[in-house]
Image (tube, grey):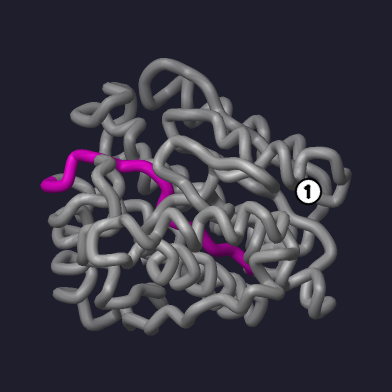
Amino acid sequence: MKIVYHPLMTNRYDNTPAGGEGRLESAIETLSANPEYELIEARKTTEQEILLAHSRGHLERIRRESETSPGGLLYQMAILAAGGAIIAGEIAVEGEPAFALIRPPGHHASRDSCWGFCYFNNIAVSLLALRSRKLIDSAFILDFDLHTGDGNINILGGDRRWTIHNPSGQGDEAYLADVKRALDDAPDVDIIVASAGFDQYEDDWGGNLSTDAFREIGRLMRTFAEERCGGRRYALLEGGYNYEDLGRNVLAFCEGLWGK
């Protein structure tokens, strides 16, 4: 299974919990230790790809904000994250699962604004880029982050070709039942993608889900993809702020998504 990543992403790029040093290390170490996971280097997205989801004014605001960010890295990191999301989508279109281990996250970024540690909407940029090349026309977006991805909804929610679900439920059983119900009721689509937020974890901000629950979410996505959209599935990292345990939770999810 391919993991999309870039070495620059270990650097601090802002002063938020998402942008601090040390956030991705446990995930990188855990996945790198397993030779079955292949690390693919993210590329920078183009301005044209960003503008599929965002206004020119928003792009320029992020570019200006980057000038005063730690190391001046914010804009470069944000376009690498969006580019990594596109690569993960391209891999998925070929029928192979992919996980983009990227930051900054993106699901709180709308067309002309952003908040919640996000700058560009990685899900929206990737889906709209794939559609612009006629690789897909529709998608199911499973956003299992602790916080509802208002940016996903604002950019994609008005188009019936995109189905977005934000699960709810306290504890593994109720939450997973909600995910399964949503997938069972979903329309046929070309691809399924997750805004993968591991802040739902029982020892993270959400205090809700076990590591095994993330594995099961991945498995449910895999089953849906194999039965409904030719195996096309991918996921992008959103939240998750227990730095020490992020690696095992990402690994569990990838095991389910891949089927290992």
User: In terms of depth relative to the viewer, which is nearer, 108 or 231?
Assistant: 108
> Is residue 248 among what the camera can see?
no
Quarter of the image that includes the N terminus: bottom left
Q: Residue 152, percent across and down?
A: 65, 43
Q: Which residue is mark 1?
A: 162
User: In terms of depth relative to the viewer, which is nearer, 58 or 53?
Assistant: 58
Outermost residue on the right side: it is 160
The residue positioned 22% from the left and 58% from the top of the image is 12
> Is residue 222 among what the camera can see?
yes
The residue positioned 58% from the left and 72% from the top of the image is 86
Q: Is residue 238 magenta?
A: yes
Q: Is residue 8 magenta?
A: no
Q: Residue 82, percent across and down?
A: 53, 66
- Mark 1 falls on what kind of element? strand
> In the rendered view, would you say 63 is above or below 212?
below
The residue positioned 23% from the left and 69% from the top of the image is 31
State how many labels appear. Answer: 1
Outermost residue on the top side: it is 170
The residue positioned 43% from the left and 79% from the top of the image is 42
Q: Residue 186, percent across and down?
A: 76, 41
Residue type at mark 1: give it.
Trp
In the picture provided, is 80 more to the left or to the right than 54?
left
In the picture provided, is 248 more to the left or to the right than 126?
left
Quarter location, residue 146: top left
Q: Residue 204, percent across and down?
A: 23, 30
Q: Which residues are magenta?
A: 232-244
**Mark 1, residues whose alpha carbon is within 10 Å: few (<14), some, or many (≥20)?**
many
Quarter location, residue 187: top right
Quarter of the image that includes the C terminus: bottom left
